[in-house]
Amino acid sequence: MMHTISETATVTWSTFKKFAFRFSFIFIFSFILVFNNGTYPLYDYISKPLTDLMHWLTPWFSKNVLGYTYDYSIFVNGSGDTSYAWISLLILLLLAFFAAVIWSILDLKRENYNTLFYWLTTAIRYYIAFMLINYGTIKLLHAQMPPPSLNRLMQPLGEYSPMGLAWTFIGFSKGYNILLGIVEILSGLLFFRKTIVLGALITIMTSINIMSINYFYDVPVKILSTMLFLFSLFLLLPFLQTLYSLFIKGDPGQLPFLQQPIYNKNWKRKSILMAKILILLFFAGQQIISVIDTKKMMAQYLKKPPFYGIYRIEKAEKDRKTIPHGWSLIIFEYDNNSVMVRDSAYKPHWESIVMNNQAKKLTLNRYQFDYTINQNGDILLSKVVEGNREEVKLIKQDTQQFELTKRRFNWIQEYPYNR
């Protein structure tokens, strides 16, 4: 017969265990509230008072207590490892420690915290699952790490940052993104008490992979990925002895079942069940809306301009006034007002452009050209300057000839294809 964790409800915890729980309870809940990362549905709308408090408290603590000299006022900019984030983490750790001391003094006679432990694990389960499902869904759409862009294809390896290299490596393969997405979505097993152990084992391995990339490729999400790992490990604490017996000692064992606190009133039990169903339904609806919005955003972001492609600028016999002599390549990739130009030394820089497709005019380098597009895709720019007509020929390059784009999956390989 399966035994439940709640069967140990009358067991008195040790003093250390009770203090460790108090510290963990305060720290984990405060971390989830402060570093929510848009995980809980609608949380961003109700957390503004707490966010405003941290935006005041963290800079004040940095300046007056730590004497910290870095820019601790950069709140949200895509990096989760800002000075603000690290100092906020320190504040939460100190808060948890001192609050746990006070709690311990005021609650000396408490035998255990089984009920609070259950609700803490519930908050952690939903936090991990919601977050990883959010990221997994984006990966299924191949949106978090998109395929290498034209600019990436033309970028020498030495120009890549470690994060850029990791993003390009992962983004190259749609299948690999889908596999990662499926594994992250499997964190949904944490929604159900009977599959907590399986779900936590999956999220531990997933978070280790995320942590490895973040640490070793300098991706600024180290705090959050580390906490995902530690939170997943926390979920396994009640099951570690059984897992050790099964996997290390080779002894037979039976995993305990995390029992929900028993409520005598029927309306309380039904209310908890209905709340869970509503939360999951709302989250599912949010995911559907997010998928639709992401697809629209991708369609707009990846909208190709009329000149989409990589072009080699044909050399002129004499210097031109309209185009600098050192320009070598020009890349039209996004439907916006800028293009990437590389000079003869292959140094990149961005140039502003203005397109008028109806009049077939292109403004580049402060000159407005008339343009024609040849059948083979080449573009001819022309401009009368000081009574002389200057022409600039942009020769379109075949992007399918890149090794990275033309090499496909092969079941049979007589030799390694390592270029």
Image (cartoon, rainbow, N blue to C red):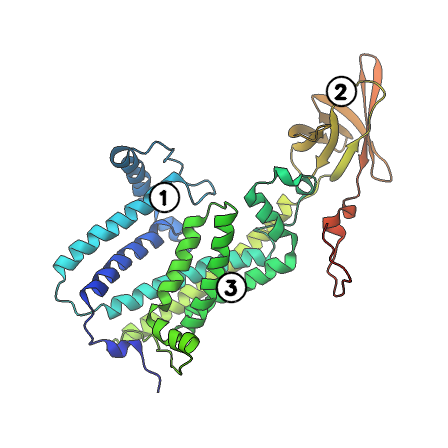
Query: Label 2 sits on what residue type?
Result: Thr
Query: Label 3 sits on what residue type?
Result: Ile
Give the residue drawn at x 38%, y 50%: 35
Residue at label 2? Answer: 322
Q: Looking at the image, is 267 positioned above or below residue 52?
A: below
Q: Are marks 3 and 2 in contact (CB under 8 Å)?
A: no
Q: Looking at the image, is 41 positioned above or below residue 321?
A: below
Quarter of the figure with residue 322? top right
The furthest residue to the bottom:
1
Q: Residues within 10 Å of mark 1 (few under 14, many from 20)?
A: some
Query: Label 1 sits on what residue type?
Result: Trp
Image x and y of residue 272, in percent? 33, 70
Residue 185 marker: 3
Q: Give the distance between the C-alpha atoms of the residues marked 3 and 2, in whole angstroms.
A: 53 Å
Element assignment for label 1: helix
Q: Residues within 10 Å of mark 2 (few under 14, many from 20)?
A: some
Residue at label 1? Answer: 86
Give the residue drawn at x 33%, y 39%: 55
